[in-house]
Amino acid sequence: MTLAGKPIGAMLGRRLRDPAAWRETVDVFAVLTAASLPWSTSLAAIFNAAMLVCMVPFLDLGDFLQFLKRPICAAPIALFVLALVGTLWSDADWSTRLHAVNPTVKLLVLPVLLYHFERSSRGHWVFVAFLVSCALLSVMSWLVAFDPSLSLKHESADRGIFVKNYIDQSQEFTLCAVALAYPIVTLLRARKFVLAGLLMALALSFFVNMAFVIVSRTALVTVPIMFAVFALLHLKWRSILVIFGSLVVLTLLAWQASPQLRATADRFSIEYRLYKERGLATSVGLRIEYWRKSLGFFAEAPVVGHGTGSTRGLFEQAATSGTEVSKEVIGNPHNQTLNVAVQWGAIGIVVLYAIWLAHLLLFRGDGLANWIGLLVVVQNVFTSLFNSHLFDFHEGWMYVLGVGVAGGIVLGTRRSGSGAGAAGS
């Protein structure tokens, strides 16, 4: 068989021997991973595995090993190693210990993404794919809100959820909506009002969905923080005051117009009161109970913790026959710091914070990639106050993809800039 007069076998052979073709394939699988993440954990895992396989044939192993010595790579690797070594002093059975290592494995992909996208010019494709995918999911969310039979999550009582759950969906929509603030402001300054208006409409559509369909309480807490970070970094004080006033007005209007938004916020106080007065296992009450017990477990082994996979066993031992909430047993205390502290003590906390700090420092410059990377880290840090989002599949992969791709772009820009500077001198 021939194509354009050339044998297909020969063309395929040349492609297989071409490093640029393999790098392009890696980019395609990264795009597919980002596009599938809002919809399917299985597809995201498959595309990610294919992406890693395609990196192997032309990987410069010596250069890659040198790259791994950077703190942005060494810190996440160290947390995986700690989880692996932590199996040695855990009292849990070995299947539980090894299962508890799994949430840290994804961190090993982060250095690979940083390395690859430092050398690729297609990193922005990944961001566009994720944004478009989330926009389509938002449309589907509205359809499911009006016709629940369309949902693939028939056992869920959450309205507007087609796949996954309302926490994952809120994380995605929040990240996309706030990330669009940077290109919108940039376009407005360049007087490109039509394109800026389209992006503003897209960002607003995410917020409208969260206001009138469903939103997680974690998103309600983190959205103002994320906007505050953007305002302090990219706006003048006069603009901050104007936008702050506008946001207050819009928030009040949304509050009055959306029963869903009011009900979500009201559940904070209602659930806390039921927990304190009657000991019921409400969402807020459970978190307080998990945190209280986890602090006690940490105090028992403050340096190295109780070992990988030990959390559930500790909660089983601490369960009492008193109130409903005191009987609850869980393997995840719904706080990233406490999750790490219980298993690996102060050493684990130091490594965890080193990851966040190294990645925050990576995104100190200006530009869209810096903004997206910074936003991903800030979102993960603050949502991890209420969940173990670095270890959760969906939010953990959002972090790995976001930091890995954005960080690679930033590193590539700095390298090309330093090379141009050296050439100019």
Image: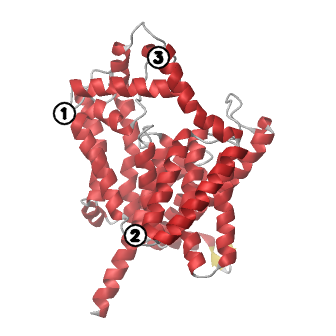
Q: What label does residue 157 carry, if any?
A: none
Q: Amino acid at mark 1?
A: Val
Task: Please report whichever mark, 2 or 3, sits nearer to the chain's N-terminal start.
Answer: 3
Question: Left or right of 305: which side holds 23?
Answer: right
Q: Position of residue 120 (x, y in %)?
A: 45, 71
Q: Say which mark, if any, is on residue 303.
A: 1
Residue 325: give its label.
3
Mark 1 and mark 3 lie on one chain; the one further toward the N terminus is: 1
Residue type highlighted by circle 2: Val
* Camera sees residue 116: yes
Mark 1 to mark 3: distance in Å? 29 Å
Q: Dot 2, crowdedness within 10 Å: few (<14), some or many (≥20)?
A: many
**Residue identified by numbered label 2:** 410
Up the image or down, 154 lies above or below 49; here it is: above
* Position above or below: 318 against 354: above
Amino acid of disc 3: Val
Q: Percent from the top left, x then y, of residue 340?
A: 32, 36
Mark yes or no: residue 165 visible.
Answer: no
